[in-house]
């Protein structure tokens, strides 16, 4: 894929950083491998360039400020969740917010968020808000160039693990791995087995021998403010638990006492709002008082008090189907071999009931 803009590559000589020159191409992880483990790392496609990003809430993607700016204008991408553009779910961005103190000359505060039109179905990556230290391993993920000499080698999600070689008041520095198009992708820290995004890929030298990622920890307050304004917790499925939802919040642990017994709990016994005896390992408690079939009752498609529409044959706990010509809301309410069409159970054409010709 040709892409026509900025991985902001900074030239470093004699230990002093000059104004970063523009590379002219947007940019993958050099010497890395194909990544299958980070569906939350996104490909951002703008009208003139591509970048990378990380889902940090169900509607917000973290990226680099220089990715969402064209001159003084803010630009908004289409966001691709997948290994490449062809194998992806797409959600349009609707707003982009570069850090208000971003400096295009020095790349200080090179961080931004993109707000999605719809919620993503992937669990967001938490933020790493501890101060980074040298010699820590980070995993870099992005869609940029895989070969510095092949400007068509971007657009595939790649990963590499590198040591932090330097930490400044703004960035963490790693060795040869990132290149143009990786901008906005994450530097991931592993804490107690959980990956957290602690850096946003920002710039490197022209030969991609080193890379700098904007520190996330120094922007904790700004990110919290942006998330609160653009994607506050809700009763929808957003991977955050809140109290007071009329039907309960599916994001809450099943142990929460919210007055609602959630059928989504794998173990109803763990939900304080569910009646006792609905879990496995005791006696059969049949009937609608349990949120889902009690595993002690045997076949869930038998007569144990719950109508399951997924059973191979009609569950005896489900109401009898409506007769042909009767009113319906969905096909399940109609007899086998018919469908709910315009609110009426209607027979379907087939080998034994051919459609006539008028």
Image (cartoon, helix red, strand yellow):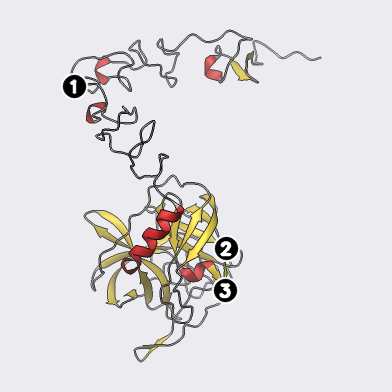
Q: Residues within 10 Å of mark 1 (few under 14, many from 20)?
A: few
Q: Height in image: 265 above or below 185?
A: above
Res. 189 visible in picture:
yes
Front position in the image: 229 or 319: 229
- Label 1 residue SS: loop
Find residue 323 and report its horizontal and vertical position in percent: 58, 7
Q: Residues within 10 Å of mark 2 (few under 14, many from 20)?
A: some
Q: Height in image: 61 above or below 210?
A: above
User: To which residue does mark 2 refer?
Assistant: 46
Q: Is label 2 or label 3 in front? A: 3
User: To which residue does mark 1 refer?
Assistant: 281
Judge left or right: residue 183 versus residue 191: right
User: To which residue does mark 3 refer?
Assistant: 72
N-terminal of the pair, mark 3 or mark 1, is 3
Q: Height in image: 98 above or below 288?
A: below
Q: Is label 3 or label 1 in front? A: 3
């Amino acid at each position: 894929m040709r892409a026509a803009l900025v991985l902001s590559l900074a030239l470093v000589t004699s230990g002093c950083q000059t104004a970063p020159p523009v590379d002219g191409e947007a940019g993958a992880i050099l010497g890395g491998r194909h990544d299958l483990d980070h569906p939350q790392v996104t490909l951002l496609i703008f009208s003139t360039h591509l970048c990378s990003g990380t889902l940090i809430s169900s509607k917000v993607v973290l990226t680099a400020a220089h990715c969402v700016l064209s001159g003084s204008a803010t630009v908004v991408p289409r966001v691709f969740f997948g290994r490449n553009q062809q194998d992806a779910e797409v959600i349009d961005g609707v707003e982009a917010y570069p850090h208000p103190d971003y400096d295009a000359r020095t790349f200080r505060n090179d961080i931004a968020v993109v707000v999605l039109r719809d919620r993503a179905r992937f669990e967001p990556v938490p933020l790493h808000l501890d101060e980074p230290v040298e010699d820590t391993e980070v995993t870099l993920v992005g869609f940029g160039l895989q070969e510095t000499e092949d400007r068509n080698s971007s657009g595939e999600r790649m990963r590499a693990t590198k040591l932090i070689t330097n930490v400044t008041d703004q960035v963490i520095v790693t060795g040869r791995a990132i290149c143009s198009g990786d901008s906005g992708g994450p530097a991931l820290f592993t804490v107690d087995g959980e990956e957290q995004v602690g850096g946003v890929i920002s710039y490197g030298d022209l030969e991609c021998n080193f890379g700098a990622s904007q520190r996330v920890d120094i922007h904790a307050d700004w990110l919290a403010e942006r998330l609160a304004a653009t994607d506050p917790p809700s009763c929808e499925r957003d991977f955050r638990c809140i109290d007071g939802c009329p039907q309960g919040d599916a994001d809450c642990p099943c142990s929460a006492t919210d007055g609602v017994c959630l059928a989504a709990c794998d173990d109803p016994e763990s939900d304080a709002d569910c009646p006792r005896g609905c879990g496995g390992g005791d006696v059969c408690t049949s009937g609608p008082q349990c949120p889902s079939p009690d595993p002690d009752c045997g076949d869930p498609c038998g007569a144990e008090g719950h109508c399951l529409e997924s059973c191979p044959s009609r569950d005896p706990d489900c109401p009898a189907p409506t007769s042909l010509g009767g009113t319906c809301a969905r096909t399940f309410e109609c007899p086998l071999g018919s469908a709910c069409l315009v609110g009426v159970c209607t027979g379907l054409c087939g080998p034994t009931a051919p459609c006539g010709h008028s």
